[in-house]
Amino acid sequence: MTDSATHPTTLDVVGIGNALVDVLTHETEEFIEANGLVKGAMTLVDTDRAEELYAAMGAGIEVSGGSAANTVSGIASFGGRAGYIGRVFDDQLGAVFAHDMRSTGVAFRAAPAVEGPPTGRCLIVVTPDAQRTMNTYLGSSEFFGPEHVDSELIAEAKVTFLEGYLFDRPEAKEAYWKASRVAHDAGRLVALTLSDTFCVERHRDAWRDLVADQVDILFANEHEALALYEVDTFDEALAAARADVHVAALTRGPAGSVVVRDDELVEVDPHPVEVVDTTGAGDLYAAGFLFGFTHDRPLAECGRLGSIAASAVLGHTGARPGVSLGQLITPLGF
Amino acid sequence: MTDSATHPTTLDVVGIGNALVDVLTHETEEFIEANGLVKGAMTLVDTDRAEELYAAMGAGIEVSGGSAANTVSGIASFGGRAGYIGRVFDDQLGAVFAHDMRSTGVAFRAAPAVEGPPTGRCLIVVTPDAQRTMNTYLGSSEFFGPEHVDSELIAEAKVTFLEGYLFDRPEAKEAYWKASRVAHDAGRLVALTLSDTFCVERHRDAWRDLVADQVDILFANEHEALALYEVDTFDEALAAARADVHVAALTRGPAGSVVVRDDELVEVDPHPVEVVDTTGAGDLYAAGFLFGFTHDRPLAECGRLGSIAASAVLGHTGARPGVSLGQLITPLGF
């Protein structure tokens, strides 16, 4: 990694990921079983399966989603300068996605696709335990490749943030390598979130290569970190991550998180909230952490900002905060 | 009105109205002023104005809406048998609207339009006082006319429920007279909600004719009732309504409601709730009342069911309850 930027940045963070609109419904545990869903995971579904599942789901709400998109919209909500790279189609849901990004202040410059499948969506079933089970119809995001990597936007940002979910296709892997090289050539940093245990297991070797070679800041929950390094304990995973990357933030759900930077280690408490829906909690944790990090706040404050941002979506249905995160943290002394 | 049905019914209530998807955002009082909005009212907007306003609004959530649609989906959520007549286009938002109706158990049989404007939407700005200000782009609902009145569905339902919002165009007025006659010819009842003070003032004479000639059950809030009868006090409005219709339910916001049937009068308390967003509160009040009414519950219980149903949407953002209303009332002894 390179520590100093060669040109001034105009953005704090640019995110790359699957551009999705979430469709959320509250269902019972029986619904998960009856429809053969993998609870708590993200499963890719084709058109037929998406239609079948949508027909089985109750009346829902639609909210712009996408993991990295949630993160950068959270950074913008804190008052940070954020950009996004992802692929929507020229349809109603694509217009909703683009509106929600731009209205939050996120630079989202890509023109919508005019050929191929419609804008992707994520069918999210929230169970009474507040756990979310995701079924993603990728739609236009399926054809994201290196040609969609906006090198100018990446060179403008202090940190390029990559979501793990996009990593399922060879073209997307190529895109991530390209984006990482562009970022480093411009003297910037690369952050990655592992996103999902199953995704890590499907592509472990490819992840390990990318993390070791290109990633400066790693986000993962405990399960994802154990899966990546094929170890049995949190401490082993943490040690492995510290050998690979400069900065790591490992989240442990209700037990908070552990954040490290080189020799520094801080244990971070969760921010108190009555949990309604865990959708987007990890994405918003990354938003808070990266907002603090790109504003040169001490490591402990970066972690605390992550906890606060996560709490802003844990208390309601959906992955985008209903309040300005900047206004939320002012009374907390930030 | 006719008191006894000539054929058995298969539905409790069929609703007719503007089929809309709501787009909700939380904004400041300054936003209302800066954008020249009529606070608390429903204003019809054309395509250009809708786009201008949407661009000014922050990131939102999309939820199926439409006043009568909210009412019948509430009735279905109570476990009642409901149908809906309204016009969507064959697009993504039309599919969302249809899904949300059918998945709640509402009979919604009309095929989507394949020519003309897209599915309508209602841009709803919620201010910190929980008041909602609505700007409706009618889209495909603009061309609703008597040819869209499904006489079979109406003849199947104990009550045909008409929303005032649809009453702005001559073809829609014709549709309401047609629907009312079909209902009465089949020995059924007609219910109407006045929806909006401005709508009442725009079409007062036409409303007065319809109410006096065709309406059996009238829903209105205090302001709408005063506007309809051009009187200054609630008691005068109540007396005028009692002269016109068999049953009336007049709501008074946080002061609850007054319900009358012929010589009977009951004052109904509101159901306690911390109010977040008033969108849909009147629609759900009608749902609770009509569910009780079509299940032959005493008048006071009909009013109480109205208050409970309204409370189920007052506590969150959006006009559709996030919980099963049937499950909600079981512990309350219904």
Image (tube, coloured by chain):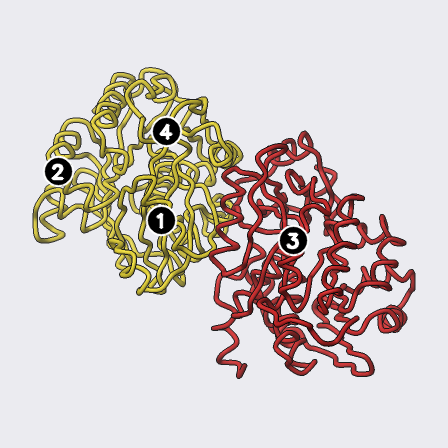
Chain colours: A red, B yellow
Where residue A67 sits in the image (x, y, percent)?
A: 65, 55
The span from disc 2 to disc 3 (Cα, nearest Å) is 57 Å
Q: What residue sits 19% from the left and 46% below the top?
A: B197
Mark 2 or mark 4, whichever is nearer to me: 2
Q: Which residue is mark 2?
A: B204
Instruction: Name the one closer to the observer, B187 or B179.
Output: B179
What's the chain of the residue with tag 1?
B
Residue B14 tag number: 4
Residue type beneath disc 3: Asp
**Residues behind callouts 4 and 1 on a single chain:** yes
What's the chain of the residue with tag 3?
A
In the structure shown, which secondary structural element does the residue marked by tag 3 occupy?
A: loop
Circle 4/circle 1 CB separation < 8 Å:
no
Q: Earlier in the sequence, mark 2 or mark 4?
A: 4
Instruction: Name the one closer to the observer, B218 or B16.
Output: B16
* Disc 4 crowd, CA 10 A, few/some/many (<14, 14-19, 20+): many
Residue type beneath disc 4: Val
Mark 1 or mark 2, whichever is nearer to me: 1
Mark 2 or mark 3, whichever is nearer to me: 3
Instruction: Name the one closer to the observer, A229 or B222.
Output: A229
Mark 3 or mark 4, whichever is nearer to me: 3
Residue type beneath disc 2: Arg
Where residue B324 sits in the image (x, y, percent)?
A: 51, 45
Residue B43 shows up from this direction: yes
Residue type beneath disc 1: Glu
Q: Earlier in the sequence, mark 1 or mark 2?
A: 1
The span from disc 1 to disc 2 (Cα, nearest Å) is 31 Å
Where residue B83 sits in the image (x, y, percent)?
A: 41, 28
**Residues behind callouts 3 and 1 on a single chain:** no
- Relative placement, left or right, of B208 versus A33 is left
